[in-house]
Image (cartoon, rainbow, N blue to C red):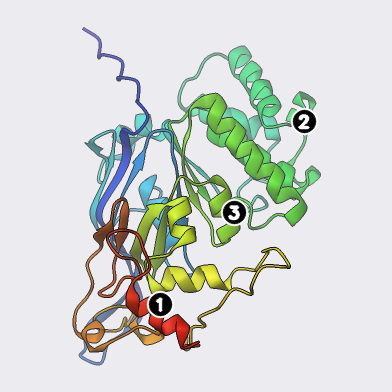
């Protein structure tokens, strides 16, 4: 008796889920109390990735975005919490039992120069995952390699070239083709355009969108460029010091952020509004990002937050629903349950505070 084929995923089904996911790295030296120090790269993150959507993950460098992405596809073992794919806990599966799952979970790396073996030809790089998973005979694999190159906008004659013979944008297309080789369900794209020229970024982003439509893909799209994330994402997860501080659908989050950190991120982006429009007010953050080895008490953002009050130093805010479809980890969110600006946010802006 053979196993049943898995039920096709309907739009909105939860494909990938993290619950209280943490990844801590040991740090040399000991704390003032004599205990071992750890860097909390990912600290209690919970999220869902639904079929057919693009979940954008944004935050400053060092906030844990890339580590989270690697944990989701099990390239990095987690410290605690769980990762589930199609309702199955894959957090601690052995390498052998994880192999079938890897066909459905793929990663596009940030650096197209470092992610391809410089000593192997492109055809061999694309054929390798198919050989590992027993895709077919040599002829079938060669045919599929040519099809993959065509799908990502490269020439089939490129199979015999080495990575150094391609531009950065072409190399990233090869990385995308490799991720597509086993027809995955979910692709985690870890800052896939940040190393590319601006003129090439739009081409690669449009390729991601076209492939999503053609192959019914689901993306986790990691980036620090807010314009990039808005262009491709259905929902947004905002991270700060390894924690999720806000989740919301794309347009409401960009139009009216609910967390002070999200507001600061958006206001730090270049202003491309119409020349005749009123200048956009900016709330500037003061101070540096706290040390993730020794995070502040209470809210981790309070040391830079223009809205912080005494409660923020005493209680860690839970990620809670503050408006329909909007979750914010803040004692004093900037939106009301109706989605309107909160009174304290308006009063601070009217005073022209700079933090």
Of labels 2 and 1, the one closer to you: 1
**Residue 122 or 340: which is nearer the viewer?**
340
Q: Assess whether mark 1 and mark 2 are in contact (beta carbons under 8 angstroms).
A: no
Give the distance between the C-alpha atoms of the residues marked 3 and 1, in whole angstroms: 28 Å
- Which numbered disc, 3 or 1, marks the residue that appears first in the sequence? 3
Image coords of residue 281 (percent x, y): 56, 77
Point out which mark residue 228 bears. Answer: 3
**Residue 236 or 333: which is nearer the viewer?**
333
**Callout 2: SS:** helix
Q: Assess whether mark 1 and mark 3 are in contact (beta carbons under 8 angstroms).
A: no
The residue depicted at 50 percent of the width and 47 percent of the height is 233
Q: Residues within 10 Å of mark 3 (few under 14, many from 20)?
A: some
Read off the residue under disc 2.
158
- Left or right side of 245 for 221: right
- Which numbered disc, 2 or 3, marks the residue that appears first in the sequence? 2
**Callout 3: SS:** helix
**Residue 37 or 325: which is nearer the viewer?**
325
Read off the residue under disc 1.
346
Q: Residues within 10 Å of mark 1 (few under 14, many from 20)?
A: few
Image coords of residue 286 (percent x, y): 48, 88
Q: Is residue 155 above or below residue 248?
A: above
Image coords of residue 260 (percent x, y): 40, 74
Of labels 3 and 1, the one closer to you: 1
Residue 191 appearing in the image? no
**Callout 1: SS:** helix
Give the distance between the C-alpha atoms of the residues marked 2 and 3, in whole angstroms: 29 Å
Of labels 2 and 3, the one closer to you: 3
Q: Residue furthest bottom?
A: 32
- Which numbered disc, 2 or 1, marks the residue that appears first in the sequence? 2
The residue depicted at 25 percent of the width and 82 percent of the height is 312
Give the distance between the C-alpha atoms of the residues marked 2 and 1, in whole angstroms: 57 Å
């Amino acid at each position: 008796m053979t196993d049943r084929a898995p039920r096709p995923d309907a739009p909105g089904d939860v494909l990938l889920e993290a619950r209280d996911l943490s990844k801590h790295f040991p740090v040399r030296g000991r704390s003032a109390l004599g205990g071992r120090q750890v860097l909390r790269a990912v600290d209690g993150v919970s999220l869902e990735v639904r079929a057919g959507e693009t979940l954008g993950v944004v935050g400053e460098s060092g906030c844990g975005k890339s580590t989270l992405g690697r944990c989701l596809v099990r390239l990095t073992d987690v410290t605690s919490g769980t990762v589930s794919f199609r309702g199955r806990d894959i957090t601690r599966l052995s390498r052998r039992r994880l192999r079938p799952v890897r066909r459905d979970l793929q990663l596009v790396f940030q650096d197209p120069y470092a992610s391809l073996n410089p000593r192997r030809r492109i055809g061999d790089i694309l054929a390798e995952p198919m050989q590992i998973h027993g895709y077919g005979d040599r002829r079938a694999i060669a045919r599929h390699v040519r099809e993959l190159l065509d799908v990502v906008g490269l020439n089939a004659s490129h199979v015999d070239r080495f990575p150094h013979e391609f531009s950065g944008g072409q190399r990233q297309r090869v990385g995308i083709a490799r991720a597509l080789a086993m027809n995955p369900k979910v692709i985690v794209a870890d800052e896939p355009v940040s190393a590319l020229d601006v003129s090439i970024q739009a081409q690669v982003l449009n390729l991601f969108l076209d492939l999503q439509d053609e192959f019914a893909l689901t993306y986790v799209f990691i980036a620090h460029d807010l314009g990039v994330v808005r262009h491709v994402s259905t929902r947004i997860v905002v991270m700060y010091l390894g924690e999720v501080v806000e989740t919301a659908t794309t347009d409401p989050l960009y139009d009216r952020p609910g967390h002070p950190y999200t507001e600061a991120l958006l206001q730090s982006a270049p202003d491309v509004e119409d020349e005749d429009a009123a200048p956009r007010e900016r709330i500037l953050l003061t101070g540096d990002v706290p040390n993730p080895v020794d995070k502040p008490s209470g809210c981790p953002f309070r040391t830079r937050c223009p809205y912080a009050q005494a409660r923020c130093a005493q209680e860690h805010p839970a990620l809670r629903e503050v408006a329909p479809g909007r979750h914010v980890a803040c004692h004093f969110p900037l939106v009301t349950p109706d989605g309107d600006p909160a009174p304290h946010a308006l009063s601070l802006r009217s005073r022209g505070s700079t933090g």
